[in-house]
Amino acid sequence: MILYFTGTGNSRYVAQNIAKEINDEIVSINHLMKQKIKKQLVSKDRPFVFVCPTYAWRLPHVVTEFITTMTYSGSNKVYFIMTCGADTSNSVSYIKQLCEDKNWDLKGIAEVIMPDNYIALFPSSDENTAKQIIQRANPLIHQIASDIRNEHNFIKIAPSGFKGKIKSGIVNVLFYKLFVNANGFHTTKRCTGCGKCVKLCPLNNIELNNNRPYWSSNCTHCMACISCCPNEAIEYKNKTQGKTRYYLK
């Protein structure tokens, strides 16, 4: 069973390609979160495969919470695939600890470089650059799928060293404390009240009022709302004006 969380499509793309190659069931964590579905996930004869983006050099907190609170049966073997713009630093240590807590046999961890999408702080990849990055990622995705199919052990993440420990530790904590909230999201005159942002938000943090979206406090900065708006009518503070929106369909 392949479970993925995605904001702008990178992790969904990786999960779908792995699922296609190994002919395994694929499940959207976004959907389970949005529908508040709590059920036992069963994978009898195949490992669980988790695919998600990297937020501040670790698993997104909402994904860690999801993994921790859900129940699993069947196989105790797991793989973690993390998409990122550059690296995942010391995320491997936190994944290993999570697997120990769940009594899982960690078979592999891999990072896949994909186009940048966190436009709340950084520029996103333009269309041509994004295509090139994805093309370079495809052989690695194929190799990961092959390893999972054959249940090979692998760790395809370079050692992070002291700097990586700081980024995945102290910087991660400060990032969530200082930046991860919905206070800066707002709409412009281009908003038509279509409600797509409401449908896409995995945490049900957006609702329409008089055909205008309003954000509550439960935000994970997945960038789904701002990147998928058909009219580019959503902005974040004064940080996103003029920036290319990135969404991989």
Image: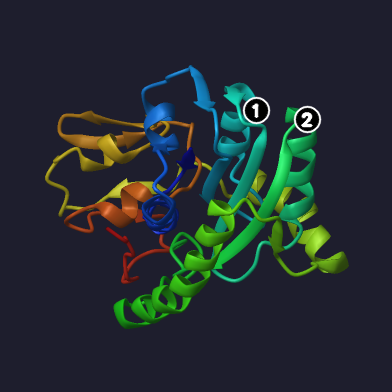
79 and 21: which one is in front? 21
Q: Which residue corresponds to the image point at 55% horizontal and 38% vertical from the top-left?
A: 46
Q: Is residue 15 left or right of residue 209?
A: right
Callout 2–callout 1 Cβ contact below 8 Å: yes
**182 lies above or below 70:** below
Q: Is residue 6 in sight in this rendering?
A: yes
- Give the mark count: 2
Residue 101: which numbered mark, if any? 2
111 and 230: which one is in front? 111
Q: Is residue 106 left or right of residue 178?
A: right
Q: Residues within 10 Å of mark 1 (few under 14, many from 20)?
A: few
Percent position of residue 142, x then y: 47, 66
In this view, which residue lies farthest toward the right? Answer: 162
236 and 2: which one is in front? 2
**Disc 1: which residue:** 68
**198 lies above or below 155:** above
Percent position of residue 52, x then y: 52, 49
